[in-house]
Image: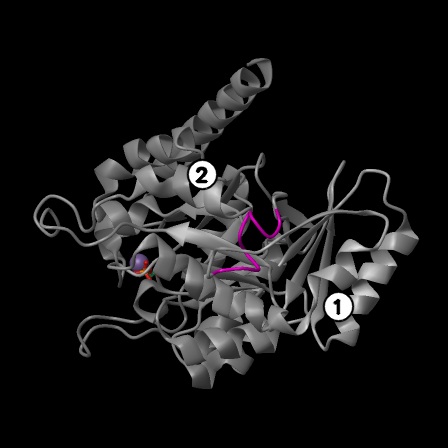
Amino acid sequence: MIIRMKKSATQDDIRKVEERIQNAGLKASVSCGESLTIIGVIGDVTLLSPGLIEEIPGVESIMRVSKPYKLISKEFNPNPREVRVRGLKIIDGTFTIIAGPCAVESRTQMIESAKIVKEIGCEILRGGAFKPRTSPYDFQGLGEEGLKYLKEAADLTGLPMITEVTGSDKVDLIAEYADILQVGTRNMRSYDLLKQIGKATAGTSKAVLLKRGDNATIDEFLNAAEYIAKEGNENIILCLRGIRTFECAKYVRNTADIGIIPIIKQETGLPVIFDPSHSAGKRDLVLSYSLAAVAAGADGLMVETHYSPETAMCDGKQSLNAKELDQTVRMSRHIFSELSKFKAKC
Ligand code: PEP
Ligand code: MN
């Protein structure tokens, strides 16, 4: 249920609405936009009589939320959602680039990578300490040792850091090190993990980046984000990274799902970023995919980079070297800034 307040509503009116919601054993979520205050009701709304709310003077209207993903929906909260990570604001209208190697391979590799990422002007450092690999014989990551290198590299450069949580047993450990906890495509449907991450990061400054499952529908993807939000953390960044189609493997690793960026943005105010590396699977496609994502309205990118892609232990084929990353970042930002200017004029 959503309660829309009149422009003339006073703080007292808002407080009365909150009180009546709480008296019914439900939770109120107040969001104040520039000209609009909306109060969302969380819980079993049949316990709340609409008449009790309607009679409060500042109430304009009451609506039922039709979406299953309530907390993150635009219906519930039409304002753009700001995700804050160590003073960095990620929100519609800003452009954030996450870059770094697929996997943490060594202390030197991570520190050198972080320096490149920082020098090129990316905002967030990535790196996998625990790697979900298709083959059990492939490099599985350095584990906690990798987290330590990541943290050292992040502290050295002052960049916030993101790394993937591959299982429930790693949530608390990773939350000790990372600013953003990543849920990978394989785990988008691990509902217990989503709940655990939501709970562990609720009320903290940690954000969660959720990747779309490679065969997940838009509704399934948004419901997965709702699992995290429902546990108390709405600091969520959505990340598209391509999906499986008949076209995958030979020419591309995954089919770029750039076309749904505007749909996701119609449905939720959460920031949406695009990962061209895991979509393309090939270095020479990453630039075009990045620019296409910017044009489609992405709020940022997550790009894999390596100081020596040829020798990378994981995803070297799709990793950009420093020069390629620099070009991708510069061109993407240029398109983003021109588009923003153009949109402001229209
Ligand atoms: C990654 O970002 O390192 C990764 C494994 O990506 P995905 O979950 O999209 O495959
Ligand atoms: Mn990778």
When the figure is inspected, residue 285 is found, relative to residue 220, above or below; the finding is above
Establish if 258 lies above or below 204: above
State ligand 1's quadrant. Answer: bottom left
Q: Is mark 1 within 8 Å of ligand 1?
A: no
Q: Which residue is labeled 2 in the image?
A: 298
Q: Residue at x 77, y 59 (%)?
A: 53
Q: Position of residue 209 (x, y in %)?
A: 48, 59
Q: Is residue 71 magenta?
A: yes
Residue plotted at (73% across, 42% down): 33
Give the image location of residue 265, x and y in percent.
47, 42
Colour mode?
one colour
Residue 41 image offset from top left, x and y in percent: 66, 63
As drawn, 253 above or below 46? above
Seen at 35% across and 61% down, the residue is 220
How many residues crowd mark 1 within 10 Å: few (<14), some (14–19), many (20+)?
Answer: many
Q: Which residues make up the magenta segment? A: 69-77
The outermost residue toward the bottom is 169
Secondary structure under badge 2? loop
Q: Amino acid at mark 1?
A: Ile
Whether residue 139 sits left or right of residue 218 in the image: it is left
Q: Which amino acid lies under the numbered mark 2 shown in the image of this protein?
A: Ala
In this orientation, does residue 319 appear?
A: no
